[in-house]
Image: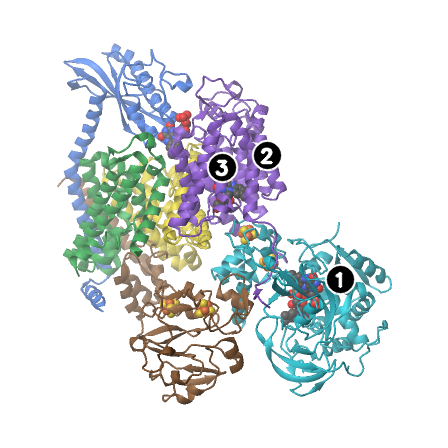
Chain colours: A blue, B yellow, C cyan, D brown, E purple, F green
Amino acid sequence: MLNLNVLEDSKMAKRESSFTNMVVTLVLVTGIAAAALGFVYDFTKGPIEVAKLKAQTEAIKTVLPEFDELGESMVLSPGEGQDSLEFFPAYKNGELVGTAIKTYTKSGFSGFISIMAGIDKDGNFSGYSVLEHAETPGLGSKMDVWFSNPEKPNQYVIGKNPETTKFSVSKDGGDIDAITASTISSRAFLDALNRAYSTYKDNKTTGDSGQ
Amino acid sequence: MNYLVIVIGAILVNNIVLMQFLGICPFLGVSKKVSTGIGMTGAVAFVMILATIVTYLIQNYVLEKFGLGFLQTIAFILVIASLVQMVEIILKKVSPPLYQALGIFLPLITTNCAILGVAILTVQNEFNLLEGVIFSTSHAIGFGLALIIFAGIREHLDLQDVPKGLKGTPIALITAGILAMAFMGFSGLV
Amino acid sequence: MLKTFKIGGVHPPENKLSKDKKIEVLPLPKTVFIPVAQHIGAPATPVVKKGDEVKVGQVIAQSSSFVSTNIHSSVSGKVTKVDFSADSSGYPKQGIFITVEGDEWVEGIDRSEDLVKEISVDGPEIVKKIQEAGIVGLGGATFPTHVKLVPPKGMKAEVLLINGVECEPYLTSDHRLMLEKADEIMVGIQLLMKAMGVDKAVIGIENNKPDAIKLLNEKCADYNGVSVQALKVQYPQGGEKQLINAVTGKEVPSGALPIAVGAVVSNVGTAFAVYEAIQKNKPLFERVVTVTGKGVEKPSNFMVRVGTATSELIEAAGGLPENTGKIISGGPMMGRAIASLDVPVTKGTSGLLLMQEEESKREEIQACIRCSRCTSVCPMGLEPYLLMTLGEKQIFERAENERIMDCIECGSCSYTCPSSRPLLDYIRFGKGKVGAMIRSRKK
Amino acid sequence: MSITVVYTIVTLAVIGAAAAVILYFVAQKFKVIEDPRIDDVDEALPGANCGGCGFAGCRAFAEACVKASELGDLNCPVGGNETMSNVASILGLEAVKKDPRVAYIRCNGTCDHRPKTSSFDGATTCAIASSVYSGESGCQFGCLGYGDCFDACDFDAIVMHPETGIPEIIDDKCVACGACVDACPKDLIELRKKMPKNRKVVVSCRNQDKGGVARKACSVACIGCSKCFKECPFDAITMENNLAYIDSDKCKLCRKCVAVCPTGAIIEENFPPRKVKPEEKKETEPVN
Amino acid sequence: MSKLLTVSPSPHVHSSESTQKIMLRVVYAMIPAMIWGIYMFGLDAVRVGLISVLSCLAIEFLIQKYVMKVKPSLTDGSALITGVLLAFNVPVSLPWWIIIIGAIAAMGVGKLSFGGLGSNVFNPALVGRVFLLISFPVQMTSWPVTRMMDVDAVSAATPLAIIKEGIKNGIPVSQLQGLPNLSDMAIGFNHGSMGEISALLLVLGGLYMLWKKVITWQTPVSILLTVLVVSGIFWMINPEMYVNPVYHIFTGGLMLGAIFMATDMVTSPMTGKGQLIYGFGIGLITISIRMFGAYPEGISFAILIMNAFVPLINMYVKPKRFGGQ
Amino acid sequence: MNQWKNFSKGFLKENPVFVLLLGMCPTLGVTSSAINGLGMGLATTFVLLMSNIVVSLVKSAIPEKVRIPAFIVIIATFVTIVQLTMQAFVPALYKSLGLFIPLIVVNCIVLGRAEAFASKNNVGSSAIDGLGIGLGFTFALVLLGGIREILGSGKIFNITIYPENYVTLVFVLAPGAFIVLGYLIALINRMKKN
Ligand SMILES: Cc1cc2nc3c(=O)[nH]c(=O)nc-3n(C[C@H](O)[C@H](O)[C@H](O)COP(=O)(O)O)c2cc1C
Ligand SMILES: Cc1cc2nc3c(=O)[nH]c(=O)nc-3n(C[C@H](O)[C@H](O)[C@H](O)COP(=O)(O)O)c2cc1C
Ligand SMILES: Cc1cc2nc3c(=O)[nH]c(=O)nc-3n(C[C@H](O)[C@H](O)[C@H](O)COP(=O)(O)O)c2cc1C
Ligand SMILES: Cc1cc2nc3c(=O)[nH]c(=O)nc-3n(C[C@H](O)[C@H](O)[C@H](O)CO)c2cc1C
Ligand code: SF4
Ligand code: SF4
Ligand code: SF4
Ligand code: SF4
Ligand code: FES
């Protein structure tokens, strides 16, 4: 009984569903909502940019030796028909200490993987950071630590470069041990590094001459 | 070949219900009988494709154009909600039999993650319109496949003596879990 | 290749213990209880009362409608009461109690053993006499025979099938009858053919009765249009739909009567009763009953007066064995277990099977393992495991769609089920409910 | 105000307005006449269209409510009880107030009253046993004891007495839903008016056989002697088919009939013990 | 009369068949393959087998007795089969605790949650196996060496794993290293799980079960034929990339699955026609996973997936009714 | 109405996940770890709370026919606010919740509460209702996420409990979500009975 009264009351108070009422209300509601959103957007736009940038610089920091200045980023293509990579040269005291390369592969167990890889001035990998992946937790997802474990030289990629080390999994005759039960992810990971390296090398010569 | 990848990926490998957890409510709620499952599938397919097309256009010709990407959620849901309601009203009047077969499921679909989810995924994957349509069609088929298999199992289980505490939703969820396990066998197909 | 029906079937151990025992005439009992409902259809109305004197063959209860039939006294003596007493169903049924005095027969019954071959009556008259003589199907269903002989409008009988299959284990009454009364049966068949207006009759006999097949085959030479069809041993070949399928290859459609494929099926005992009724003027008041069982001292075939108590038959077969657990009226596959020895023999009693205690307990019910054996043995192509569950969960609409009403209650499914599930129990229950549902819909 | 905010407002407002206008006209043009109560119920529902009720959305649920004669199985999980009671009041489906009733089992044929004459070995449900034969005793009307009523009761109000093999009703749990009445193939269960303190005077027998037969089958059978019928000062007892029946609406619990019944077929329950002949009182307290 | 007569509905006789007998016959049929497994892997095979069988029995008993509170039904023999088949399906090097987890998944999740024998939708042993495969991919894919191998090696690749690697790396079939030849594989000089290595002994068990009418021919034959035909088509298109169809038949768990696991009557269709559809589906999914999927072997997944279709198949594929429609 | 009862009902008696079985997608989709469950739960709670408040404020100004679209717009607004805020301040969590944040808008609980409760009650009760239900949802998500995380990765809130070699991986994957939730609901059904 009581409930019914409540219902009745609220009904009484409600506005009539006439055409104008409806349209006006909807326009008003959406308008106010939009205004609110617009302000929030404006307010968060800055922080979002900052957060994005911060994530990127953090990643670059972890993959390169110490540096004090980041150079202008470049977008370079690894080859015909492939999506291009982003290069971030880093300098210390005006001298190039290494380049961070945002590289990727599409052959992960669950497709796309994006990796920030660092190559020092000698052309060796100085570090990597997995930015984005959808690999299985507990399997492929272990790549963020697997290849940077100094205790396991056979999986360690840091300080090595594809000129001297065969950057493919041992199952395929390479020098790097794959993540247990995740050969696919490991291959993909190495594919991303190889892509970074070869693009780096291709552009090193051209880049140098351009300087 | 690219299209085949989208199709198999959406139906089997990344099945929308079993692997991506979208549209679980109708999957659990409307799967008690095979016949209802079939009706629901038809309705979902219809709305999913339609919604993907419309939201694709909104995204590419309105939101992107004015740099309003953050309005995606609100714009999509508004469009989908009105679209579904409109289709329902029209169907009821124009073809009562079709309304009986599909239309009654339409309201259920507005608040179904699958529709909005697929619309957003289409945008995220940067598909073109044709790919988007194939993508959403395949997802709808994947949804229907899971739903109809599941309805069959539930009709079967209705006749079995499932332990009291597990009757109903719990055993349905466990069944869905085993089904998801089985579907993992398709991983890597694309 | 021997013929048999196309779908399903089982082959339980035959155990025909009494197949070489000649039919003996059972001595007259002291009292009889003759139920007024011994047939499918409306019960007959008693026309005698307490104290009346009756003779053998006298009508004591009158047919009350078309699908009903007369009941005749099987003894002579005095009516002691008209009251209720349990029959084989376990429920009290109305019947007439008579104390036997002498053996005085009604005028006009030809009690000689001579074969009367010439047929002197025409079709309609045969039907009429069959009706008056109270003849019902003796194959077990006890359906009034005169009804069967008149096809519904628009249908035409083409062939008469005589059911000499006797596929039930243990039972031998039809077998013995065929061996001992072959000529009488042949004349009975001629009479039935004439009544139906067909010129073809086939006697179906399973291959485990080679002597009967041989004998009747020889007799066929003397009788026009009659032939014998030997059949592979397979239960439930005696079911009329299965017999028709085995002999003619035709399938009676779901829910239809045999006449829909132009066939009428009658038991050999029925044919013999027809012979006696028309040629000897003797109504149906006695029949052959097999008394058998593993523990029975003298498995026998008796000619028994209707109304005789079960205990008398057992006594004549050597008495009730100590470890009897169950007594079945009929065969082990379709018979009814009876709860008391006072149950009388009726027109439909083809045998009494005494089962020993250890045979009579059912095995423990286990879960259905969906082995589909029940499905594959079902002669009607049904899915017993499903029908049972639908009965158990009372989902009767679906049971109807799954054609539960087609079940002929042959029991092959329960017999076969490795998990000893009481399939037929539940199916019968479901049939009852679905039948009621269908009837109420028709109203 | 930045330009984005302006765009935002304009875009959304346009989408909103367009949606509203189009919907309004479509709704006008394609109007379908329906039972107006469906709209009322629909409005009372949350409109979440979640399918939690098992129907295809709120409106389908509303239609089901309007069609249903009782809201028992219909429930909206989002709205909960509150919503459902609103729906009930819209549809005028509130439970009609009835005299409280309680189930009673009209058979007292326990093992010591009713000798067994055969033993049953088949599917253990009353429905099936009754379709085969009359029961394990000489009484064809009595309880079979396989507990179909027990299975049917959703409220745990029936227990099968382990010794007598006959079901007993726990009065306080019984909600008089009648499920057991429908389940019993022997028609033994009746919903009777609930008396003060759960007191009862009942003919606990359904045997319609003649006296002798009935007595032979069961020592506490009603033999149709009519003594109670003659005794009752309130005309609460009727005789039919050799069987007495006490109408619970007329019975005033005077217990005169109990005293005259020669077989003890009439049972009194929950009365204080009588001063005389205390041994006649039956132990009928429900176990458990 | 001293005792009461029993009354019961017809029929009053019962065949000599029983569930126990059927289940035992399956166990008999598995014995040759079991002996071969023990011969090839030694005591480890016994260890895995015992742990698996005992834990399956124990779990069924404990759950039925203490959780479901029903009479335990160990004697029907179905838990025994599940135990043996689970052991048949895993590497014999599997640690004991993983086997027990597998048994819990098989019996608890796969069987008893649905109500126990006969109610389950999915094949319990396979629920157990796939559960383990997904949960412990490392342990579940390291295959110990058999007595036929040089003692130095610690693990061996199954033929299917070698083939899968070949496909992934684009190595032609003729250059694949370490593939046993066909006759070795049929007899059982081969790597893999204890129960799957000897195709011929499995076929022998299957013939025994066919003879004893424990299984019907439809399921195994349709699975094998489908695999043969589909892989045959691919082989004919490109024999360098796809292996010989006969090789497919004899390798991996196909025989074990087709003969012992797909035929589980609880989880397969009721009619012959249904079983043909079911077998076709299993064959098709198996070969698709083998050729294009991430896993080298697909029969387990294929059977589970088709298990899910069984209710639908049973609903729409009915036996031939007497008297037509 | 008793405000405490109003608030606490969401935890067990009317728990949206375990009892009402609503909002199943995020429940299953994001609960591979307790922290994800917590994040998703709190995000949803915020939206529930705010939309309940706003709806109960404007309820009488909205004509009957457009109430659903209007409510959806209100909810979507708060969802977008959550989206933007998370992107700005907890980008890592935002990333791991992915698609499911925008999908809060179609979570039946949110619209359901707005309609069933907020549109009929005053601001105070509506806020308490929203908070209660939201926290009940959060509780369920954290419970589910915690169980899955412990079983599937040997951790809870990222703190290792036992070595990774012993984890049962399936629990952090899709099937594990279904199975754990199934048994949880069964358990809760049983607890409710007793
Ligand atoms: C649920 C699941 C997730 C998987 N995720 C991955 C993955 O993230 N990365 C990967 O390389 N393989 C993954 N696999 C594939 C298997 O681990 C497979 O064994 C592997 O591809 C081949 O084994 P290997 O790496 O030992 O050669 C996954 C398998 C399953 C069942
Ligand atoms: C209402 C009714 C009408 C029947 N009419 C005929 C009929 O016209 N012709 C016929 O051959 N049998 C007729 N029958 C008998 C059945 O075909 C059949 O012989 C009887 O039901 C027993 O068969 P059974 O022992 O195989 O169950 C009729 C049965 C019923 C119940
Ligand atoms: C399962 C089953 C088995 C039967 N077996 C026989 C049999 O062996 N012999 C027989 O004469 N009738 C048998 N009948 C009865 C026949 O179906 C049919 O009613 C009878 O042959 C018709 O002849 P009647 O009316 O002269 O008895 C059986 C019926 C069923 C349902
Ligand atoms: C021919 C046959 C095959 C069987 N196969 C399996 C099997 O693959 N896995 C299993 O767990 N049980 C199997 N069983 C045993 C049993 O049917 C199974 O445990 C049930 O699924 C449990 O309900 C089999 C039984 C038979 C008769
Ligand atoms: S024969 Fe028995 S166990 Fe086999 S399917 Fe039929 S009912 Fe089930
Ligand atoms: S009793 Fe009925 S269901 Fe069973 S086999 Fe015979 S006809 Fe089929
Ligand atoms: S079923 Fe209903 S009427 Fe019967 S005892 Fe239970 S609650 Fe009472
Ligand atoms: S009262 Fe009726 S339903 Fe209950 S046990 Fe007795 S016979 Fe069965
Ligand atoms: S939360 Fe309901 S469909 Fe996804």
Label 1 close to label 2 by CB (< 8 Å): no
- The CA span between labels 1 and 2 is 47 Å
Q: Say which residue appears at 35% left-offset and 73% top-offset.
A: D102
Instruction: Judge depth for marks 2 and 3 and give the one in front.
Output: 3
Viewer-nearest residue: A143 or C337: C337
User: For residue E23, what is the image quadrant?
Assistant: top right
Position above or below: F150 against C277 = above
Q: Nearer the viewer, residue E292 or F67?
A: E292
Name the subunit of mark 1.
C
Q: Nearer the viewer, residue D162 or F65?
A: D162
Left/right placement of residue D9 relative to residue B25 reads left
Point out which mark residue C406 bears: none
Picture disc at residue E84: 3
Question: Residue E203 — which label?
Answer: 2
Mark 3 neighbour class, 10 Å CA radius: few under 14, some 14 to 19, many 20 or more: many
Left or right of C130 in this view: E69: left
- Can you say whether E101 is above or below C318 in the image? above
Q: Is residue E257 visible?
A: yes
Looking at the image, is mark 1 or mark 2 nearer the viewer? 1
- Look at mark 1 in the image and give the residue it sits on: C175
Task: Return the chain for callout 3.
Answer: E
| Helix, strand or loop under label 3 | helix
Q: Callout 1: 10 Å neighbours few (<14), some, many (20+)?
A: many
Per the image, label 1 sits on a secondary structure element best described as helix
Query: How far apart in space, not on screen, are marks 2 and 3 (Cα)?
Result: 17 Å
Instruction: Please report, as a chain letter, where disc 2 is located.
Output: E
Q: Is mark 1 within 8 Å of ligand 3?
A: no
- Which residue type carries mark 3? Val
Picture coordinates of residue C142, whole percent (x, y): 67, 70
**Who is closer to the viewer here, E113 or D142?**
D142
Location of residue D179 (image quadrant):
bottom left
Going by the numbered disc 2, the residue's amino acid type is Val
